[in-house]
Image (cartoon, helix red, strand yellow):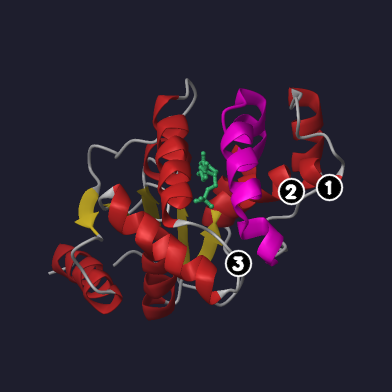
Amino acid sequence: MPDSLRIAVDGTAASGKGTLAKGLAQALNLAYLDTGALYRSVALGLIRQNLHQNIRAEDAVAAVRAISPLNLPDDAELRSEKTSAIAAEVARIPEVRQALIPHQQRFAKHPPKGYHGAILDGRDIGTIILPDADFKFYCDAESAIRAKRRYNELLSKGETATHTDILTAIEARDQHDKTRKVAPLRAAEDAHHINTGTLSIDDMIAKAMQIIASANE
Ligand code: DC
């Protein structure tokens, strides 16, 4: 095992990549960065300034400057469906992606003190941000399963939603993420694929831990 471990986790919307990344972070004492929250924070900044209707690249880049990856807001608004939709638009802007690269690479290279390395989850971590990561995982599941999980999560937080609306929104975001010109969502060639639709949370984490352990045998 290297002194400082770097792990990339990518995957489709609501695929469980965040849950996998957090589980591995805890098991391996790695600092965790949810890079989707960076795009969401930029989106929220634009929404709060009412600049989200016709998003201009310069406003979005100014919103990037206002965020700090070590201190991202974690309120319900960040996770709302509206912020999700604007985040997918923001994520298509090449200047925004470019401006966020150093934030992410710095975090991976210099994780906060006390950790054995860093784990980042997103859409382009294994392909663009950390092409030399020690381990790469790509999470996916059928969109109906992902929508059901997301629907239950929203209901448990007291939000109102319909399963059909969530499914439509998830499929639209996947389409946005996979077809954009810059850094589209795709699995790195050397990523380990995990079908999160057929695994419990514990089994998904155990499977990834097994892959990491077997590389060190
Ligand atoms: O993972 P998430 O749903 O919180 O991501 C929000 C949006 O940001 C989503 O449309 C994909 C985009 N994103 C991205 O393009 N690249 C990343 N590294 C992380 C997220």
Does the rendering let one see residue 5? Answer: no
Q: Magenta includes 82?
A: yes
Label 2 crowd (10 A; few <14 / some 14-19 / many >=20): many
Q: What residue lies at 43% left-to-right and 78% top-to-bottom?
A: 26
- The one of 199 and 38 positioned closer to us in this rendering: 199
| Count of numbered marks | 3
Residue under numbered circle 3: 159
Q: What residue lies at 60% left-to-right and 32% top-to-bottom?
A: 89
Label 3: element kind: loop
Residue under numbered circle 1: 48
Name the amino acid type tagged 2.
Leu
Name the amino acid type tagged 3.
Glu
Q: Position of residue 50 (x, y in %)?
A: 85, 39
Q: Please give the range of residues in magenta.
A: 74-100
Q: Position of residue 84 (x, y in %)?
A: 59, 47
Are discs 2 and 1 less than 8 Å apart at CB? Answer: yes
Would residue 71 be found to the left or right of residue 92 on screen?
Answer: right
Residue under numbered circle 2: 44
Q: Position of residue 186 (x, y in %)?
A: 33, 35
